[in-house]
Image: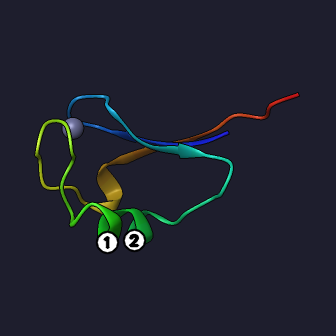
Amino acid sequence: MFMIICSHCQAKIYSGDEVKSPKQILRLYKGRCKKCDSPLDPEDFSIEVRESS
Ligand SMILES: [Zn+2]
């Protein structure tokens, strides 16, 4: 499981099995968190990768 979490509000911005780069995610959400509407920077993301066993 690959997850990208907003560092402002901890909202899960993306989760799925497909690994995406922060730049792709930014383009998807027009550079803003869909929950708190904060402008997002690639360095602002928390990226978590969880192995599903
Ligand atoms: Zn947010």
Identify the residue shown where x is 67% and y is 39%: 1
Check residue 23 in the rendering and tell me which mark sits there, or answer none. Answer: 2
Identify the residue shown where x is 27% and y is 60%: 29
Name the foreground residue: 3 vs 28.
28
Query: Which mark is in front, 2 or 1?
Result: 1
**Residue 4, position as x, y percentages in the image:** 45, 45
- Dot 2 crowding, Cα within 10 Å, few <14, some 14–19, many 20+: few
28 left or right of 22? Answer: left
Decide if ligand 1 comes within 8 Å of the CB at mark 1. no
Decide if ligand 1 comes within 8 Å of the CB at mark 2. no
Q: Is residue 30 above or below residue 49?
A: below
Identify the residue shown where x is 34% and y is 66%: 28
* Residues under numbered marks 2 and 1 in contact, where contact means CB atoms less than 8 Å apart: yes
50 left or right of 35? Answer: right
**Residue 7, position as x, y percentages in the image:** 29, 37
**Residue 53, position as x, y percentages in the image:** 89, 28
Give the structural element (helix, strand or loop) at label 2.
helix
- Dot 1 crowding, Cα within 10 Å, few <14, some 14–19, many 20+: few
Identify the residue shown where x is 63% and y is 58%: 19
Q: Which residue is mark 1?
A: 27
Amino acid type, residue under disc 2 in the picture: Lys
Check residue 40 in the rendering and tell me which mark sits there, or answer none. Answer: none
**Residue 21, position as x, y percentages in the image:** 51, 66
Q: Is residue 40 above or below residue 7?
A: below
